[in-house]
Image: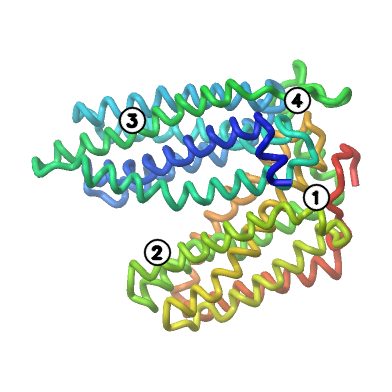
């Protein structure tokens, strides 16, 4: 199945553009925080810049999903890429000239986050409009695997560029190195826009036309109503919301603290993240096996995977060596990588094409909106409990959520079914 997917020209163009854009994004993710610290030396200013990128992304992503359904994912993604080219080009030029003041950085960071609010739902809705349904599991696995590789390789390439470009001349040389990093990201968007232009969209089914002239806010409401009316979608989305609120954000805080307070080593943190990333890649590589597991309902597979993940999380806070953490995080990555592909494939198959942008934006909003709240609450909770207790509690909550969903909801019977467009 992977060989058949690779022969599809649309998938090859999408994969090429995705790699270029994702690697370029890592340059900005490394360079932008460093630019803020170079200009201000203020951690509060850095936090505000990160918030200015995150808030519009979370607030406008539902609107982005509605626009994707109205104008097609390809059109919205192209416009978001053009906007990113302008914003990153301006940031590179101003940084090179030493004119990237803090107010300018605030405005450009907000613009970058806003562009991402439209790029993310268009990106997730693009694949089922570009490749045949039978190739979706393999195509999702290949694209997500490349995304994971880009997240591993991109920061290393960015660090290498900054190291080679920074001279002994002081702050001016450092700013020019950062400008080059932004320029690399800008060029990556230019090239990925060109690859996207080569993609030929598949025709919509007879009942899958785009939104005509429906008001955008009403379209957002229709998307929420569609998810709520479909019992399977509603059940799964509510379940993922609970997991994100009580587990997802907590782990964003707990893993760095585990490396800092227990292992007392920044390289150890890199080892943990690297091992987890390698496991995730392995799980995504197993995605072509997904159609062969259709005898097992998608919901049952998801709940069993989450329960096993919870059991692996519980002892993580008790480790005292990096290899012990790696032994737990590697299988966690395998489970997470495989389930990511399964979840995206299920949503893409279940939701009709004309609603897919909104459905994916709601799915992304669940994690982008709730996980930061969970992370903030975790910081407060750690004043009153140990890190080991937090990991145990997170694992136990995940197991409990999976068991309760199995016993008290229809989630265990949800199948990896072909797209129907009908309420469950």
Coordinates of residue 405 in the picture (x, y in percent) = 80, 66
Coordinates of residue 143 in the picture (x, y in percent) = 61, 43
Check if mark 2's residue and mark 4's residue have beta carbons within 8 Å: no
Mark 2 or mark 3: name the one nearer the start of the chain. 3
Mark 2 or mark 4: name the one nearer the start of the chain. 4
Real-space CA distance between mark 1 and mark 3, rounded to the nearest whole angstrom: 42 Å
Query: Residue 385, can we see it?
Result: no
Disc 3: which residue = 183
User: Quick check: 387 above or below 405?
Assistant: below
Identified at 33% across, 47% down, the residue is 46
Real-space CA distance between mark 2 and mark 4, rounded to the nearest whole angstrom: 41 Å
Disc 1: which residue = 234
**Outermost left residue:** 169
| Numbered disc 4: secondary structure | loop
Coordinates of residue 176 in the picture (x, y in percent) = 21, 34
Mark 1 or mark 2: name the one nearer the start of the chain. 1
Real-space CA distance between mark 1 and mark 4, rounded to the nearest whole angstrom: 28 Å
| Numbered disc 3: secondary structure | helix
Disc 4: which residue = 202
| Numbered disc 1: secondary structure | helix
Check if mark 4's residue and mark 3's residue have beta carbons within 8 Å: no
Mark 4 or mark 3: name the one nearer the start of the chain. 3
Which mark is drawn over residue 270?
A: 2
Real-space CA distance between mark 4 and mark 3, rounded to the nearest whole angstrom: 33 Å
């Amino acid at each position: 199945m992977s060989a058949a997917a690779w022969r599809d020209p649309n998938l090859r163009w999408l994969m090429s553009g995705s790699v270029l854009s994702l690697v370029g994004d890592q340059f900005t993710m490394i360079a932008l925080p460093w630019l803020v610290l170079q200009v201000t030396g203020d951690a509060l200013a850095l936090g505000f810049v990160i918030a200015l990128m995150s808030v519009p992304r979370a607030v406008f992503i539902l609107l982005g999903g509605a626009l994707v359904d109205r104008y097609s994912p390809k059109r919205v993604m192209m416009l978001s890429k053009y906007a990113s080219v302008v914003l990153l080009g301006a940031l590179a030029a101003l940084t090179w000239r030493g004119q990237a003041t803090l107010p300018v950085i605030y405005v450009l960071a907000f613009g970058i986050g806003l562009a991402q609010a439209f790029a993310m739902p268009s990106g997730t809705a693009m694949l089922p409009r570009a490749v045949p349904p039978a190739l979706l599991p393999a195509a999702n696995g290949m694209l997500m695997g490349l995304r994971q590789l880009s997240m591993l390789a991109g920061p290393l390439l960015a660090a290498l560029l900054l190291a080679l470009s920074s001279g002994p001349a002081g702050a001016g040389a450092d700013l020019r190195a950062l400008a080059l990093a932004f320029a690399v990201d800008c060029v990556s968007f230019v090239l990925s826009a060109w690859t996207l232009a080569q993609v030929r969209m598949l025709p919509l089914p007879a009942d899958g036309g785009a939104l005509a002239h429906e008001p955008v806010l009403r379209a957002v409401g229709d998307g929420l109503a569609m998810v709520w009316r479909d019992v399977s979608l509603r059940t799964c989305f509510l379940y993922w919301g609970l997991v994100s609120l009580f587990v997802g954000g907590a782990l964003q805080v707990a893993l760095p603290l585990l490396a800092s307070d227990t292992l007392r080593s920044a390289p150890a943190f890199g080892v943990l993240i690297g091992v987890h990333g390698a496991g995730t890649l392995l799980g995504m590589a197993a995605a072509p096996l997904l159609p062969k597991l259709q005898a097992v309902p998608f919901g049952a597979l998801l709940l069993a995977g989450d329960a096993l993940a919870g059991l692996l999380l519980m002892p993580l806070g008790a480790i005292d060596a990096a290899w012990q953490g790696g032994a737990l995080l590697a299988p966690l990555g395998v489970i997470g990588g495989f389930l990511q592909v399964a979840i995206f494939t299920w949503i893409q198959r279940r939701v009709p094409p004309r609603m897919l942008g909104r459905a994916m934006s709601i799915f992304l909003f669940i994690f982008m909106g709730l996980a930061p709240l969970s992370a903030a609450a975790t910081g407060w909770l750690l004043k009153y409990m140990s890190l080991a207790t937090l990991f145990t509690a997170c694992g136990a909550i995940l197991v409990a959520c999976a068991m309760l969903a199995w016993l008290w909801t229809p989630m265990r019977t949800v199948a990896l079914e072909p797209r129907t467009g009908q309420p469950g």
